[in-house]
Image (cartoon, rainbow, N blue to C red):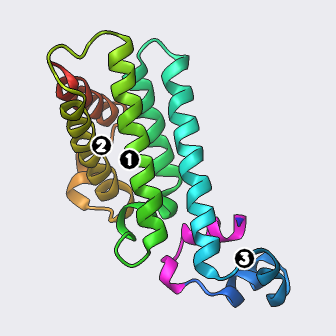
Amino acid sequence: MVTCARRLASEPFDRLTVSGLCKAAGVAHGTFYVYFENLNTLLSEVLGLFVDYVQIRMRSAARQGEDPVRDTTAAYYTLFQANAGLMKCLVMGIDAFPEARAAFQRLNNDWAKTVVRALKRQNKIGQSTEDELMRRAYALGGMVDQYLTALFVTEDPWIAAISQDPDAVISTLTTLWMKGMQE
């Protein structure tokens, strides 16, 4: 699984093969099938565990600092940057790989629910319905994912040129979240 995660950082998931992964991991080809039914099963498990890891890190960041929105945004930025290959599978591989689609949808849904629950706890929902807040959280999350995908995955030169200062990027994304979830 570790070898698969590492390989996803440097090559697209559709180029991964069982034999290539086994060779890189230093295990016999047949050993793979003791643990996994096929390559999609492995990819599904790796991406599922990665989604769990992202959620744990973001929730932890929200609880540790003075500004939960900024701290969570900073944690997501850092996770996206450090794991661009895995994030690419989640964000861009969803059409060709149903397991990636399911993992990414779970990440988005769980995070949107987390944001809405936090707003409810803080009594900051005003007149908005839960559905409205979920729509906002999904839209804002999509904007952040698009921006970070352009920055770290597709390496858009224009986005990179205006994103040299990570703190400034995190501040911009935090402002979007704050203003977008306000009444």
Cα separation, mark 2 vs mark 3, equals 32 Å
Q: Estimate the x, y position of residue 125 in percent, counting from the top left.
A: 23, 17
Cα separation, mark 3 vs mark 1, equals 26 Å
Instruction: State the mark number for residue 9.
Output: none
Question: Which label sits in the foreground, 2 or 3?
Answer: 3
> Which type of secondary structure does the marked residue at label 1 adopt?
helix
Which numbered disc flags the more N-terminal residue, 2 or 3? 3
The amino acid sitting under disc 1 is Asn
| Magenta-colored span | 2-15
Q: Is residue 7 magenta?
A: yes
The amino acid sitting under disc 3 is Phe
The amino acid sitting under disc 2 is Gly
Q: Is residue 90 magenta?
A: no
Q: Residue, x 32% and y 54% (percent of image)?
A: 151
Q: Which residue is mark 2?
A: 141
Q: Residue, x 36% and y 29% (percent of image)?
A: 115
Q: Are marks 2 and 1 in contact (CB under 8 Å)?
A: yes
**Of helix, strand and loop, which mostly describes the magenta segment?**
helix
Q: Residues within 10 Å of mark 3 (few under 14, many from 20)?
A: few
Q: In the visual, does 49 lie left or right of 133?
A: right
Q: Estimate the x, y position of residue 120 in percent, counting from the top left.
A: 33, 17
Cα separation, mark 2 vs mark 1, equals 7 Å
Which numbered disc flags the more N-terminal residue, 2 or 1? 1
> Which type of secondary structure does the marked residue at label 2 adopt?
helix
Q: Which image quadrant: the N terminus?
A: bottom right
Q: Which residue is mark 1?
A: 108
Question: Which label sits in the foreground, 2 or 1?
Answer: 1
> Which type of secondary structure does the marked residue at label 3 adopt?
loop
Q: Are marks 2 and 3 in contact (CB under 8 Å)?
A: no
